[in-house]
Amino acid sequence: MARFELKLPKMGESVAEATITNWLKEVGDKIEADEAVLEIATDKVDSEVPSEVSGTLVEKLFGKDDLVQVGQTIAIIETEGGVEISSSFLVDKVIEDEPAPAEAAEIEKTIEAAQETTATPNDFAQETSGSDKFFSPLVKNIAKEEGVSVTELENIQGSGKDGRVTKEDILKYIEDRKSGVVAAPKAVQETVNETVAAKAEEPKAAESKTPVAKAVEPVAQKSQQTVPVSVNGGDEIIEMDRMRKLISGYMVASVQTSAHVQSFIEVDVTNIVKWRDKVKTAFEKREGEKLTFTPIMMEAVAKALKDFPGMNISVDGEYIIKKKNINLGMAAALPNGNLIVPVIKNADQLNLVGMAKAVNDLGNRAKTGKLKPDDTQGGTYTVTNVGTFGSVFGTPIINQPQVGILALGAIRKVPAVIETPEGDFIGIRQKMFLSHSYDHRVVDGALGGSFVKRVAEYLEAFDVERDF
């Protein structure tokens, strides 16, 4: 029998780690090649990790909610044959019939290293699994050995990515606690009680013994009290899923970070509607793709961003970063009601056919959960189509660290004044609203309004004689 190392695969240049959200296979289960073994999650995308070989799962080196680095071994699969291999060697195609001694030794070291940094299932690990924060197996082990409670662990200010607690953070906390710089939570009440008792023994404070105790007791208990939630017999309490918690955090952080302001403009898209009705069948027949309004709108936004590069920026503290590439985020609703924003890279370099293919591809993969982490990274400006749900316009929240987001309203037939050389008259036109939310810290009304006006001008000047 051979032992195959299942490693966390590389998921994109900007992704270095992922969290295990669910094991689809248990130890002893049979696994077919390309069958999913576990589910993982990055900051925005959930995906599955398939096995590259057929065999039996004999060991899981990480548990649910553990943070795993790209390239780390996460499981051992026993296969037929006598060669011990790893997934990284299979990808690089450097494994022959039998591994060289040096390679075999390196594999053994990898397994040992993974086992050393993996938390053994215990009560402490189960307690931390209920926490909103992620802790690496190494941090969990150190905390358990040093008697650091889950409450203490959650209150440590982490210096790692997204505020995660690193090895250095917890070791410093333990050192500070031993030196008296910080006190363990369990010792707080004892300290308060000792202080009250000492005050009570002082002759001059004898009369104030009861008031002191009454004054201190509520303070000690205050942190343990929670605000009760009022529900009745017909109410249902549902915990947010992981993605909804992330979205909630992103939205609150964006409102707290950016000074949101909006500009609205109405656009006559009659020519676009007529042109699309005329060519959509031929387009689908030739390109094998459906032609929606979204790629036409995206094309206009990309052109406007080239005209107004001040909208294609991000903010980092007191610095403004001008982006070289125009990468358009496309907000998409998932079947479960959550939201995700895949990104069309270098959108200004795509013609209408290329834009349509990119929009359809990202939209379809978003609905089926097939997006890769890199598909949601690197956006410089975002477009959201609120008209899909019948909304005339909206006030979308900026996707940080970008400085603008455009909402596309529903296209409606409305009576409008039509100007002609012979005079004005009333006619039926196809119109929609564009709602532009922008960050007033760095984007003033002149720029924010001019940008959305330029998008409108490109849409209204659409060439009905153009080819696709």
Image (cartoon, grey):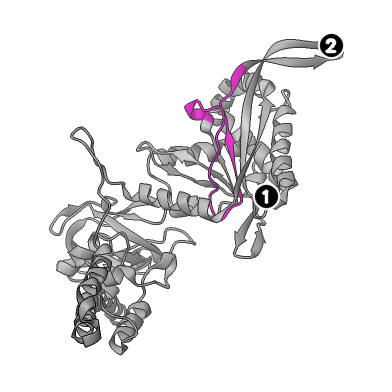
Q: Residue furthest bottom?
A: 179
Q: Identify the image quadrant of the N terminus.
A: bottom left
Do we see residue 116 in this rendering? no
Q: Amino acid at mark 1?
A: Met
Q: Residue furthest left?
A: 28
Compare marks 2 and 1 and give the one earlier in the sequence: 1
Residue 395 lies in the magenta stretch: yes
Q: Position of residue 347 (x, y in %)?
A: 62, 45
Relative to 251, 54 lies left or right: left
Q: Secondary structure at mark 1?
A: helix
Identify the residue under disc 2: 423
Q: Residues within 10 Å of mark 2 (few under 14, many from 20)?
A: few
Q: Position of residue 452 (x, y in %)?
A: 69, 38
The region drawn magenta spans 387-413
Q: Amino acid at mark 2?
A: Gly
**Residue 122 figure quarter:** bottom left
Q: Position of residue 131 (x, y in %)?
A: 27, 61
**Residue 340 figure quarter:** top left
Query: Which residue is located at x 32 percent, y 55 percent?
Result: 40
Q: Residues within 10 Å of mark 1 (few under 14, many from 20)?
A: many
Residue 138 lies in the magenta stretch: no
Query: Which residue is located at x 49 percent, y 46 percent?
Result: 342
As measured in the structure, the alpha-carbon distance from the residue carrying label 2 to the one carrying label 1 is 38 Å
Q: Identify the image quadrant of the C terminus.
A: top right
Magenta stretch, main secondary structure class: loop
Q: Which mark is residue 311?
A: 1
